Image (cartoon, helix red, strand yellow):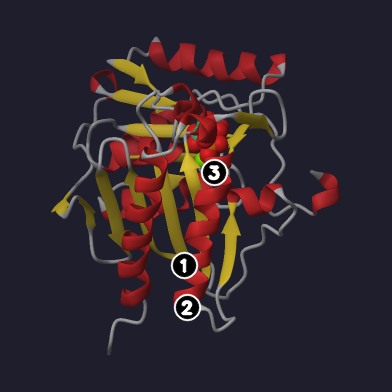
Amino acid sequence: MADPWQNEYDFAVQVARVAGAVIRNAGEDETKVQTKSCAVDLVTQTDERVEKIIIGSLKEQFGNGTHCFIGEESVAKGEPCILTDKPTWIIDPVDGTTNFVHGFPFVAVSIAFAVNKELEFGVVYSCLEDKMYKARKGKGAFCNDEPIKVSDVNDINKSIIISEHGTDRSIEKVTKIFSTMQKILCIPVHGLRGSGTAATNMCLVASGASEAFFEIGIHCWDIAAGAVIVKEAGGLLLDVDGGPFDLMSRRMVSANNKVIADRIIKEIEIFQVVRDDAPIQKK
Ligand SMILES: O=P(O)(O)O[C@H]1[C@H](O)[C@@H](O)[C@H](O)[C@H](O)[C@@H]1O
Ligand SMILES: [Mg+2]
């Protein structure tokens, strides 16, 4: 049988490359900051422009009305964030907006595609490094067309773990986040890292540079593409309580193997976040 989503996959790679070039070439004016949910949740003209370019091209190519779109900036403007069974594109035009604004050199375009609520492929273009990560369900994961795989480290004491502190600065959440990081650091692990972009963090796990990345408070567009890439590189995804991974829950552990994942999960202090697909008035 012909591969049903190959055109979509190939096109997503092309669009991500175009989007990455727009980000790389953004002028000073296009890095001027506005804020969204709070003073440290940043957005620029570039985030909005790149999302329009991506969704515009996808609609032009596959625009017979059958495809749905969940994009970070569209959702910020009130579009629904509901994953249905329909073919759905899940897009973060600029993952690592804070990095982008500051010239901190990790910024990614993240494009995923789900059908029947199952992720079919993911593309993460780390555009300042010019690294194109991609994976298609059942077909392996690649960086710049070279196969990648997760690390084979089983010993937590020999691991590098990635986490992020996100944009919620309530003292209760920040305390839990740093308490978790302290406990993990003191296991001890070789190191704790964070690139400032969830999509890139997941690609670092997929390519074996880090054993695990976890975060509470990320959104589906930050991690959907990375989720396919980690899985196809031989890794796994779990909820922060060890249960099954739920893309809309804003909680995620991605790891090279179950031994490392379980050891990290033991230390995670969970706090409440509102699901991506919660009714808008409750957000
Ligand atoms: O908002 P963008 O798209 O830049 O993405 C987020 C990152 O991906 C998170 O890991 C990170 O923790 C932050 O929440 C950051 O906002
Ligand atoms: Mg993001």
Mark 3 element type: helix
The image shows residue 103 at horizontal and vertical percentages of 41, 24
Q: Please give the residue where the numbered disc 1 appears in the rendered image.
A: 57
Tell how many labels.
3
Q: Quadrant of residue 5?
A: bottom left
| Ligand 1 within 8 Å, label 3 CB | yes
Q: Amino acid at mark 3?
A: Asp
Query: In the image, what residue occupies the spot 52% across and 42% down?
Result: 46
Q: Quadrant of residue 254?
A: top left
User: Quick check: 252 above or below 269?
Assistant: below
Q: Amino acid at mark 2?
A: Phe
Say left or right for 242 vs 140: right
User: Quick check: 73 above or below 261?
Assistant: below
Mark 3, residues whose alpha carbon is within 10 Å: few (<14), some, or many (≥20)?
many
- Which of the two labelled residues, at mark 1 and mark 2, occupies the earlier sequence position? 1
Mark 1 element type: helix
Distance (Cα) linking label 1 and label 3: 16 Å
Q: Amino acid at mark 1?
A: Ser
Q: Nearer the viewer, residue 212 or 142?
A: 142
Q: Please give the residue where the numbered disc 3 appears in the rendered image.
A: 47
Distance (Cα) linking label 2 and label 3: 22 Å
Farthest-out residue, right:
281
Q: Nearer the viewer, residue 78 or 103?
A: 103
- Which of the two labelled residues, at mark 2 and mark 3, occupies the earlier sequence position? 3
Say left or right for 9 vs 221: left
| Ligand 2 within 8 Å, label 2 CB | no
Q: Please give the residue where the numbered disc 2 appears in the rendered image.
A: 62
